[in-house]
Image (cartoon, grey):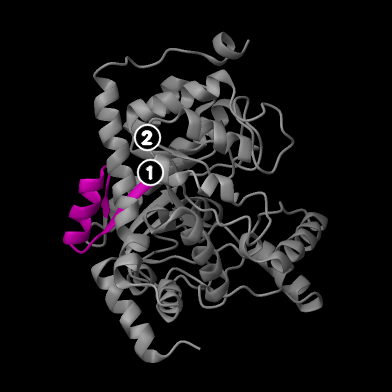
Amino acid sequence: MTSPDTLARARALLGAAPVADGHNDLPWAMREQAGYDLAALDLAADQSATLHTDLDRLTAGGVGAQFWSVYVPARLAGDDAVSATLEQIDFVRALVDRYPDRLQLALTADQMEEARAQGRIASLMGAEGGHSINSSLATLRALHALGVRYLTLTHNSNVPWADSATDAPAAGGLTRFGEEVVREMNRLGMLVDLSHTSADTMRDALRVSEAPVLFSHSSARAVCAHPRNIPDEVLARLPANGGVAMATFVPQFVLEEARDWVQRAAEELAAHGFEALAHTPDAMKVLHAFEARDPRPTATAATVADHLDHMRAVAGIDHLGIGGDFDGTAFQPAGLDDVSGYPHLIAELLDRHWSEADLAKLTWHNAVRVLRAAEDVARDLRGSRAPSIATLAGLDG
């Protein structure tokens, strides 16, 4: 059990090198629960009854930067997906505007550092799933112009040009158009996020990308054999690429027993008319009733630390980060129940003799470096490469 002294040391470390978290689904949770109404769910107040995230808990957790996910589900296709993504972006901007003393929009690595220096949480955006661009490079550029700084190539379903980890293989990784998406992201300075993608898509993206890649919320497949996690042979390629893998907290991705339980819980949700990932208040009532009959295996901060230990051994400390996935899942590990919990993970790693310098890379420096590296690559590419006008039909037939 972590001692109070170690926890205090963890909090002090986060004061110097706060968490730059790769993925938080608050925007979609706010859409579902309040129609984006920040007066109805005021994040300056305690929202622990319905959300993993509010401003005071972000501060308590030592969060200095947050990639807000502008996720939309794959059931929204075509221009419907694009419109919903724009609404998500609009919400993040409204969120930052409402709390200017606590949050600051960040579009660059320098702006991340500036926000931290001013005592505000740097707010970045990542689009989760290539369906958000509707196979349009012009739409990709528009999202970048609006502030989106990574695109997760797929979500839980394939897109026409890339395979997902949790769908039947169709493209065998990236198609020719998928490769062009990666190249255009490099030219823009938008991070190529490989969470949710198949191992073949990961390999193809690493082959094509001229900039470091990101895994915004993925853990180690060798520790928990969920297809959403990263195989060791892919982790081992991160040093050559310069990318960063941000370990997630989602129990079914870090603990085998939790994965099996979630499959059973999904069947229970479906029987009551809910989607598998639903965690609205009504869906949570169903899940809690199911949990009373079928106790849920509980991951802990130590479970997540096991993944980080393994990922450090394979990829090295310069290629690790944290992507909690708060408000994107019904349950979180014990001790990491909401965004105030990061000190418990840092304390666990201190107990495992991680150095303060290594922990600072994990929490802050690696995330800043990977964004800055993508910006540097883009600056060079824009001098020699025009915006791509390639189309899905033109490249893939």
Q: Position of residue 50 (x, y in %)?
A: 53, 68
Q: Which mark is residue 242?
A: 1
Q: Position of residue 315 (x, y in %)?
A: 46, 53
Of label 2 and label 1, which has the lower sequence position? Answer: 2
Circles 2 and 1, Cβ within 8 Å, touching? The answer is: yes
Q: Quadrant of the C terminus?
A: top right
Q: Is residue 368 above or below residue 146?
A: below
Secondary structure beneath dot 1 equals: loop
Q: Which residue is mark 2?
A: 211
Left or right of 163 in this view: 245: left
Left or right of 211 in this view: 197: right
Q: Amino acid at mark 1?
A: Gly
- At a point 77% along the width and 59% down the height, the residue shown is 263
Query: Is residue 141 one of those drawn in magenta?
Result: no
Between 288 and 357, the one lying in front of the other is: 357
Q: Is residue 367 above or below residue 127?
A: below
